Image (cartoon, rainbow, N blue to C red):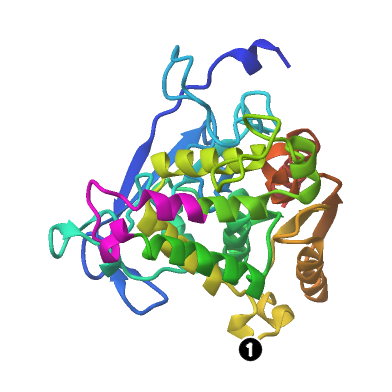
């Protein structure tokens, strides 16, 4: 592959798809309410071929968005690329010279898709806490509307890590005939009590920030609450080994303790920085809604807790990937998923990748992960073409 393909900027632009213009076309949500005049922000990379067998859907994690790769400008040196730019693009593992890649911001989000900080068409005011509670399945049903809009009959693959992996599993359950393969990375078939607990504490940090104002904040956003929620969550994305290697017990500014409660350790300064950066790009109310959707996620719920029965309709080929140091969604949860799929005679491959990065490994172990994804997609495209 020409090295210039890796250095030349991939330029993309955000696109919008609006649906549910009428009551009949509205999206019926699991909570029983309907979402009308909803928007999905999405980006596409590459071209859909004549056979329509090269479409790949990438699904983002909690804090992600539609900007999976590339840049919006040609020469802005300060602009950062999309969140999985090492994986998606010309000549990269998910090669946009071969595949038509789609990535959309989930409903409930704050990066262009309809969410709690969008205008409610019925009141002409911001939804805020009047926005209906959503589920992972609701996100997928909205993405299915986008699929039809793009005139894609069948995805070659749907790929996602963390919350994106939850969406992958819902795609396999809800639309088994419309995907050739599914790749679930660093994810789980149901959120554990521990993860629910972390989400609860994060939401409470936001809700107890005086600036939150019952979700009706305007210019004075609940920055401290949201930053604290992010710091807590970020700890769960790392591993003890990676934190020791990166920070140890290094002091931030001096060789001695300050004997007060300001920042002493480098790890404290790092978390504060992560919190402040997150506030600049994410919305507090969206954080509440998206984490609640994750809380409710349980693939076995539709079969009274029996995961095998719940996955009985899955027909696509699957690849399930976990990481040794991921204690948020450990390999044991991936194995439970794989066993249930095997019980249904699903074609499933699984791999545990050795990594010290913790849960964030799905964003960082791009060399090992990239080879696996490239090979799996190539094989599945051959299977799809040969019927």
Residue that appears at 57% across and 41% down = 263
Q: Is residue 54 visible?
A: no
Name the one closer to the observer, 284 or 310: 284
Q: Which residue is mark 1?
A: 304
Where is residue 362 drawn, in percent x and y?
Answer: 70, 45
Residue range (magenta) = 210-229
Label 1 residue SS: loop
* Vertical position of residue 79 compared to residue 137: above or below: above
Task: Give residue 292's position: percent from left, percent from top.
Answer: 47, 68
Toward the bottom, the furthest residue is 304
In the displayed structure, 283 sits above or below 14; it is: below
On screen, residue 166 versus residue 321, left or right, reads left
Q: Residue at x 23, y 46 (%)?
A: 219
Q: The N terminus appears in which quarter of the rendering? A: top right
Q: Is residue 277 above or below residue 236?
A: above
Q: Is residue 69 magenta?
A: no
Residue in view at x 26 percent, y 48 percent: 220
Can residue 333 be seen? Answer: yes
């Amino acid at each position: 592959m020409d090295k210039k393909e890796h250095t030349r900027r991939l330029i993309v632009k955000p696109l919008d798809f609006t649906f549910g213009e009428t009551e009949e076309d509205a999206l019926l949500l699991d909570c029983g309410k309907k979402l009308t005049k909803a928007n999905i922000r999405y980006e596409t990379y590459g071209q859909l071929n004549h056979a329509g067998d090269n479409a790949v859907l990438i699904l983002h994690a909690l804090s992600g968005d539609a900007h999976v790769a590339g840049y919006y400008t040609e020469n802005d040196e300060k602009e950062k690329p999309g969140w999985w730019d090492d994986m998606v693009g010309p000549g990269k593992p998910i090669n946009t010279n071969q595949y038509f890649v789609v990535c959309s911001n989930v409903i409930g989000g704050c990066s262009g898709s309809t969410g709690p900080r969008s205008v409610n068409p019925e009141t002409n005011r911001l939804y805020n806490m009047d926005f209906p509670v959503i589920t992972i399945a609701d996100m997928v049903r909205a993405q299915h509307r986008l699929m039809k809009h793009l005139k894609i009959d069948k995805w070659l693959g749907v790929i996602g890590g963390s919350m994106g992996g939850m969406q992958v599993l819902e795609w396999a359950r809800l639309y088994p005939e419309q995907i050739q393969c599914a790749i679930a990375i660093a994810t789980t078939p149901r959120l554990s009590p521990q993860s629910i607990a972390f989400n609860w504490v994060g939401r409470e940090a936001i809700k107890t920030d005086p600036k939150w104002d019952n979700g009706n904040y305007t210019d004075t956003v609940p920055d401290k609450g949201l930053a604290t929620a992010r710091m807590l969550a970020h700890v769960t994305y790392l591993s003890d080994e990676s934190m020791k290697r990166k920070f140890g017990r290094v002091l931030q500014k001096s060789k001695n303790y300050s004997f007060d409660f300001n920042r002493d350790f480098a790890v404290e300064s790092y978390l504060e920085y992560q919190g402040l950066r997150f506030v600049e790009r994410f919305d507090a109310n969206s954080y509440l809604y998206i984490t609640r959707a994750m809380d409710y996620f349980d693939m076995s719920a539709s079969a009274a807790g029996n995961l095998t029965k719940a996955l009985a309709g899955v027909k696509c080929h699957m690849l399930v990937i976990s990481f040794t140091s991921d204690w948020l969604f450990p390999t044991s949860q991936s194995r439970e998923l794989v066993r249930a799929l095997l019980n249904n005679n699903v074609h499933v491959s699984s791999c545990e990748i050795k990594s010290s990065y913790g849960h964030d490994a799905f964003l960082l172990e791009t060399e090992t992960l990239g080879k696996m994804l490239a090979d799996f997609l190539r094989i599945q495209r051959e299977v799809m073409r040969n019927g």
